[in-house]
Amino acid sequence: MKFPLIFFFSLVMGNVLAQDILIARNAQISFFSETPLENISGLNKNVTAILNTKSNDIAVKMQVVQFEFPNKLMQEHFNENYLESDKYPAASFTGKIQEKVDFGKEGTQTITAKGILNMHGVAKERTLTGKLTITKTGANLVCDFTVPLTDHKIEVPKLVFEKIAEVIAVKTNFSFVPYEQKK
Amino acid sequence: MLFILSYGSAIAQDDLLKMLDNESTGPLYATATFKSTRVINGQSVETIAKKHLDFRISHRFGALNSGFSNLWGLDESRIRIGLEYGLTDRLMIGAGRSSYQKTYDYFAKYKLLRQSNRWFEPVSIAVFAGAYTNTMPTSPDMKFYNNLERQMYVGQVLIARKFNDRVSIQLSPTFLHRNKTESQIDENDVFGTGIGGRFKLSKRTSFNAEYFYTVKKIGTAYVRDPQYKDCLSLGFDIETGGHVFQLHLSNSRGMIENQFIGATTGSWGKGDIFYGFNISRVFSFDRDAKKTHK
């Protein structure tokens, strides 16, 4: 019985919000970790994010398995051993922008978003700082932050040859456009 | 309406997430159906990624039932050294040399289909073609009159499905042709199929099993010398970051297709089995891609 209710609920919400919503499809998230032996980097070009300009709510979601690594062995280990993407396929952030933003006015401002970062099945409260640029067609958001592996119970065993930094630097880039339902 | 508005912003954010769920993400491909390009002896559906080189060393010790004087097989070993390279993310080539019967092998493997979350890609499929050259000196047991007689060929279709993060199963229909067989009553052509799989015990170790069945009889005619057995191998994969170690027991001493599919003589019942291991080290030579993500 729960499902139809939720479905109806989200339908109503969708309609109410549609004109206030910005969406970023194929946004990019990359991370970089410098290690003594070899640098580890990954890039996901299929991130989606959605921004409610009225309530300042923001949500970001990505499929972990879509991170591409130059070293395919690292990509395999990333999915199989560290992020366990079969068990925890998606990572997400949901939060609220704390500052007042005038989405009608072009310009750049620094914003902070307070919310929950969810990856590897562990939710962690985070406040992230980014740069939001309002443009004619939408908005652009750039946000850099770090993720300590222990925050999300990502284990680095002592017996591996790869040395992995305890804290990973993450870079994100979103280009928001007005939301339109995809056919 | 009031009811909806009275909900906290956490609910509103979850709704945004739900909207994102409706967005298509593109196909999600299964990763690492197997840890290595071999299940144990046989090829797995995995290929080496583009511009990656796999350096493989494989050992098979002597028979376990060869007694104390031979330290149950540890006194002797057969070795294969191989270099295998990914030309594209789907096509790999490789070559190797086995000390067992001084055989050279060369092969290509192409991944036709990658398992994904889309309905029309339920399995991964790869095709494998290999050729083998026996360079043993000609002898009364095995007389070669010309070099063509030293050649053997294998074709395989590898069909695998990763059912979940632990279990992967593979079927490997196989055709093997020897230009000349060791045994007079063994036909030149061998038809068979392999079935293999893995069960992950932890993130970095898995238990693997593999069985190669060959057709013994076509109609009423026997096509195989009865001294040849089907090859059964059991083992573990242990991955340590850069390397994959595969430790196993098999009733085949040979490590390449013409040997373990076509000429396995060991018997598990008599303890005529061989302890062995493969070491695989993969190197990335993709320097261009390294720069892009900084």
Image (tube, coloured by chain):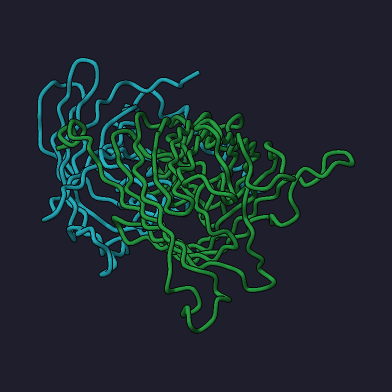
Chain colours: A cyan, B green
A144 left or right of B13? left
Residue shown at 62% from the left, 55% from the top: B264
**Residue occupying the far bottom of the picture:** B68
Which residue of the protein is positioned furthest toward the front in this rendering? B140
Q: Is residue A4 above or below residue B56?
A: above
Q: Quadrant of residue B20?
A: top left
Residue B287: tell me if it is visible.
yes
Please provide percent x and percent y for residue B167: 57, 55
Name the residue rendered at 32%, 62% in the picture.
B240
Extreme residue in the right direction: B220
Q: How many marks?
A: 0
The residue sitting at 60% across, 46% down in the picture is: B170
Q: Position of residue B22 (x, y in %)?
A: 48, 32
**Image height of B43 relative to B25, above or below:** below
Q: Nearer the viewer, residue B72 or B276?
A: B72
Give the percent coordinates (x, y) of residue B238. 41, 63
Evaluate whether residue A118 shows in this view.
no
Q: Nearer the viewer, residue A172 or B103?
A: B103
* B259 lies left or right of B211: left
Asked if residue A144 is positioned above or below residue B26 in the image, the reply reads: below
Q: Closest to the observer: A6 or A88?
A: A88
Q: Quadrant of residue A153?
A: bottom left
User: Closest to the observer: B5 or A100?
Assistant: A100
| Horizontal side, residue B188 vs residue B255: left or right | right
State the residue at coordinates (43%, 39%): B47
How far from the left and from the top, in percent, is residue B182? 63, 47
Q: Quadrant of residue A17?
A: top left
